Image: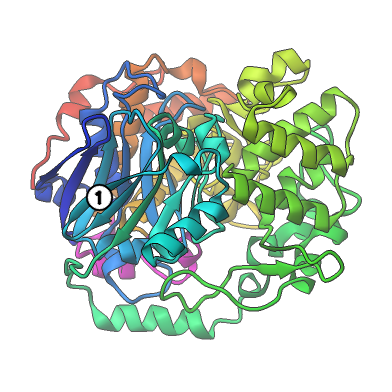
Amino acid sequence: MNSANGSMLSIDVSAKTTREEGIDDELASFIGGRGVATRLAHERIPFDADPFGSENAVYFSTGPLQMSQMSFTGRMNMTGLSPLTDGLLSTNAGGYLSRNFVDTGHAVVEITGESDDLVGLHVTDDGVTVEAVPHLREATVPDVMSHVTAEHGLESEHVAAIGPAGENRVRFASVMTYDHRAFGRGGLGAVLGSKNVKFLTFQGESPPQVSLPDDVQSTIHREAATADDMMKRQGTTAGTEFINDDFSLPTRYFSEQSFEDVEDIGGDAVEAKKTNKAACSVCAFACKLPTKDEETGLETEGPEFETIFSFGSNAGVGDLVSIMRSNERCDTLGMDTISAGNVVSAYLAANDEFGNTDLVDELVRKIAYREGIGDTLAEGVDRCHEALGVENWSIKGLELAAHDGRVLYGQALSYATANRGGDHMYSATMLSNEYGGDLDAETLDGKPEFLITDENRAAVRDSAVLCDFGGGYVSEDAHGQLLDASYDELLAVGGRIVELERHFNNKRGMDRADDRLPYEIPGFEDALDEYYDRRGWTRDGTVPDERVAEYAVVG
């Protein structure tokens, strides 16, 4: 099986020491990216660790496809113990960082400990330099990027940075790269903040090699370049009106399921403000959305669909420029737009202030700096909903995505079982078979079996590492050829990754009681039983220790 190549570089920021380790066996067994980082985290982070403690670790990792020149491969993975969900969590970001990361010769970089001073870490193929940066205390992401460029001659594609939200341990703080690309979900930016790491840079000239079939790469790259795909023009906003009209677009903190001003904030409206094409590294699909409002001069990248939902319909905001401003402010301050928008919407619901765009803007800033009510909201919906007097629209502590499980039953089951909570990328069941697909959306019949396959597929995707937009262009056969394994073998690896995540979380006390929804759908408990049975887990949602023991690295 093809896997990422390279060593693991471990950086202890407490002692300011580094250690390089060979992880060939782990890579061979778990591909790279999310898979190998999950394996390492399961073995190296104590099950009782505090997410903000020095014993927590953060793993940056790439997969074998980052050694290619194929479209849909400009992404990389980040894994750690989440301060938002209190469980093991992986997130990934696009842009150009991954190629600069692999140029260092490392497959994984591990950050442990806690620095006494605010630092930046410069990782090269010659070693690591630790830079004291006290003057960057609470600096915004653009200011960090400017510092790195001015002092070190490196542009933003070399940098992973946190903003004030990360330093202030906002539980949904992101890690930003290339200005607008985010390791967004789960608050790993706050983990870096707790370690007093403001940024990392990656630079080198020692990329490891992986043998990949040229004909498969060229076919996929050509199809990405020539495809007439609406998402190349409108990104994920392309489906906004369709979802609103035919399914559900959660509105006014989930109290309604369609938004009257959807045309003002949907795909056509976003495309009208798009200034040019943009892409991730070596990708010909070019789906990114550089946008500008000519009247105000506001420029940002996006917003994508989930931000249209979180700061738009869910906040009762029908003003696209306001959503663009919220998007830009979150990128600048370093926060996940889904969680930030949902927690802002919860506050608007509590105070009957839906549509108040000035208040939205004020709240985003207050959250990042934990000022006033922002200190409460920075804890996330799960921890602050009682104080606000609103319903808890989160799962496992993670704020819900837009795809509404009240009408998409398979997606609801996916949210409940996902090890990282209410996230639409852990398994995109709605895209695969519920938005006009093979299975009826409002039933759970056949969904547990499908969900398991899709969760395993997503784990392989995140380990390779492959953009989800590549799913329509990289077939099962192409997956097998690229990774030199049968698709069934790859899905088996994906299953082991999911089980390692679940086992880690079980050891932290999570079980069936955490696989809950904030609403009821018929047949849910039976479907959950079937899901556990098919996984080989207990009916209380736990992975038997002996199953994980079977996953010893085999090389």
Q: Residue at x 28, y 29 (%)?
A: 113
* Vertical order, 375 against 403 (above or below): above
Q: Residue at x 8, y 43 (%)?
A: 554
Residue interval drawn in magenta: 466-487
Residue labelled with disc 1: 129
Q: Is residue 419 something that shows in the picture?
A: no
Q: Secondary structure at mark 1?
A: strand
Does residue 410 appear left or right of residue 321 in this picture?
left
* Vertical order, 537 against 17 (above or below): above
**Where's residue 201, x and y in %?**
35, 55
Q: Residue at x 33, y 66 (%)?
A: 99
**Where, by quadrant of the figure, is residue 50 drawn?**
top left
Q: Nearer the viewer, residue 118 or 506?
A: 118
**Where's residue 162, x and y in %?**
49, 44
**Where's residue 491, x and y in %?**
30, 50
Q: Is residue 468 magenta?
A: yes
